[in-house]
Image (cartoon, rainbow, N blue to C red):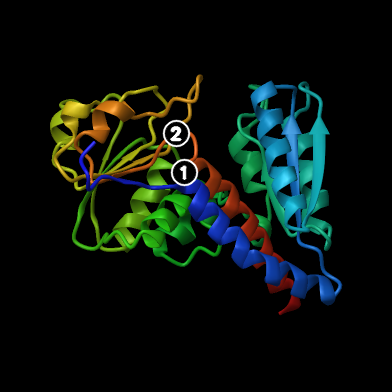
Amino acid sequence: MTEQTLILDGARVAQDIKDGLVSRVKRLSEQGITPCLATILVGDDPASATYVRMKGNACRRLGMESLKITLDAGTTTEELIREIQKLNADPNVHGILLQHPVPHQIDERAAFDAIAIEKDVDGVTTLGFAQNAFGFAAYPSCTPAAIIAILDYYRIPVEGKHAVVVGRSPILGKPVSLMLLNRNATVTICHSRTKGLGDIVSQAEIVVAAVGKPKFIQGDWIQDGAVILDAGYNEGNVGDVDYEACLEKASAITPVPAGVGPVTIAMLLKHTVDAAEKQLG
């Protein structure tokens, strides 16, 4: 690591976002509204259960309400959508999060798209994706929003930079590419099957790793001074970037854990508070 390498502390960014929510939650409470995030967990995947619990705890620490809906692993798409529609109709619920992944028999896209756009605080609907593409989504996908929040917090310029995004999922790689493009970056989208990937990444001034493979991004792919944002989280607290190797080259880098992850949860809370405030008109 060079003297100039900046560790992008996601825990610090997340705390700054949550600190800004305290007075807003209090003001809503004084008007009889408690921001409420409903989480839906289908099945008994332990990692998903942990994520849902973390989100619930984060809500409670801010004085928000967390409504947890747990459904059997054998739940059908139709049954899940009925539960989502109940939450859509509940004026006391401001945000809805369907924990990913869902069991194989469920049409996940149909379930996501059943979430009302005004309660899509996780940015998973097709309509939300389209709004993000046009640059006016109220609630962009939370991990892409977290990446942008980190860049903003540390005042890292995006305009005119060449950003390479490795990953193409509809709730991470694709939306963050669009958000960077809307900030006037030149964006190249790659994935695990891209030919000559190392050569492409080596041209990047900003690298977003979102491929879901541990230590996939190699140190010798990174140009000197690149900014690296690792959105991966794999078994053993390992990101998608070979952290130690990339640290030698980067001007700034997010660690795993305590990088993008905490900011993702903070953005989810912020979006839920935003949605509650919109209820006031």
Q: Which mark is residue 260?
A: 1
Type of amino acid under label 1 = Val
Query: Does 22 sit left or right of 242 as displayed?
Result: right
Seen from the viewer's position, the closer of residues 218 and 277 is 218
Type of amino acid under label 2 = Val
**Count of numbered labels shown in the rendering:** 2
For mark 2, give the secondary structure: loop
Residue that appears at 73% across and 57% down: 62
Q: Which mark is residue 110?
A: none
Q: Residue 273 appears in which quarter of the rendering?
A: bottom right
For mark 1, give the secondary structure: helix
Residue that appears at 50% across and 63% down: 137
Q: Position of residue 203 (x, y in %)?
A: 13, 41
> Compared to 35, does 171 lie above or below?
above
Question: Is residue 15 something that shows in the picture?
Answer: yes
Q: Residue 271 appears in which quarter of the rendering?
A: bottom right
Q: Residues within 10 Å of mark 1 (few under 14, many from 20)?
A: many
Query: Does 94 sit left or right of 222 as displayed?
Result: right
Residue that appears at 57% across and 55% down: 15
Image quadrant in which the C terminus is located: bottom right
Instruction: From the image, tell me which residue sits under label 2.
Output: 256
Furthest residue toward right = 32
Q: Position of residue 10 (x, y in %)?
A: 47, 47
Question: Is residue 171 something that shows in the picture?
Answer: no
Residue that appears at 34% across and 49% down: 177
Query: Does 46 sit left or right of 143 as displayed?
Result: right
Q: Position of residue 42 (x, y in %)?
A: 74, 29
Kindly check if marks 2 and 1 are in contact, taking CB atoms under 8 A apart as contact: yes
